[in-house]
Amino acid sequence: MELDKLYSGRFSSDTWNKRNNLWKILCKEFFSRYVKPDDDILDLAAGYCDFINNIYSGGKGRRIAVDLNPDVKHHAKSYVEVHNCRAQKLDFLNDSSIDAVFVSNFFEHVRDKEEILAILRECLRVLRAGGKLMILQPNIKYLPGEYWDFFDHYTPLTEKSMCEALSIIACVFMQNRS
């Protein structure tokens, strides 16, 4: 899919400014509780880099944005590493090399649940012991209708289906470690 063309007209410039202001507040007042300035942070399916640009920009940790859309490099600030690759194949990252993985409004873009499991496995592979996986996701139970009108929204999830997916991956992960 030509993501740069698909997303180029989705939001107005006024919406961009409002989104950025909202993300500044969210990062400062909420997400900063879960990550430290020196943590290595991966923003998976970073899109417009709202999170990764606003979470501790002065820290010494790596800030990494991953997205298939080639336009992501135009949204990332200078201190953000940008990688255009698939979320389930983060070959540029070593095992246990990341302190926090952030995923926002991404899993509905994934074509099927097996692919979601592959992405979650890759997130666990790169997370350090004690690392955090933070998922912000639309819930079909509370967000039916227009949200699903977008061409690239495939997989509706609820909090229960996401918890089940995480449980499956956690069980497999723990079995592989023992």
Image (cartoon, rainbow, N blue to C red):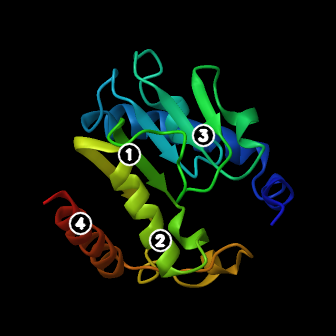
Task: Judge the density around disc 2: few (<14), some (14-19), many (≥20) Cα neighbours within 10 Å.
Answer: many
Secondary structure of residue under mark 3: loop
| Residue type for callout 4 | Ala
Which dot, 2 or 1, sits closer to the camera? 1
Mark 3 — residue?
49
The percent coordinates of residue 78 (x first, y second) are 64, 20
Q: CA distance from mark 4 to mark 3?
A: 28 Å
The numbered disc on residue 116 is 2
* CB contact under 8 Å: marks 3 and 1: no
Looking at the image, residue 1 sits to the left or right of residue 118; the answer is: right
The C terminus, quarter of image? bottom left
The tag earlier along the polypeptide, 3 or 1, is 3
Q: Nearer the viewer, mark 4 or mark 3?
A: 4
The residue tagged with tag 4: helix, strand or loop? helix
Q: Is 178 above or below relative to 73? A: below
Q: Nearer the viewer, residue 154 or 27?
A: 154
Marks 2 and 1 close (CB-CB < 8 Å): no
Q: Earlier in the sequence, mark 1 or mark 4?
A: 1
**Disc 1 designates what residue?**
126
Q: Position of residue 48 (x, y in %)?
A: 65, 44
Amino acid on which the number 3 mark rests in the picture? Cys
Mark 2 or mark 4: name the one nearer the start of the chain. 2
Q: Earlier in the sequence, mark 2 or mark 1?
A: 2
Tell me what residue is drawn at x 52 percent, y 59 percent. Answer: 88
Which residue in the structure is indicated by mark 4? 170
Q: Tell whether label 3 touches label 4 (CB within 8 Å).
A: no
Badge 4 density bin: few <14, some 14–19, many ≥20, Cα 10 Å: some
Of 141 and 79, nearer the camera is 79
The residue sitting at 29% across, 80% down in the picture is 160
Label 2 secondary element = helix
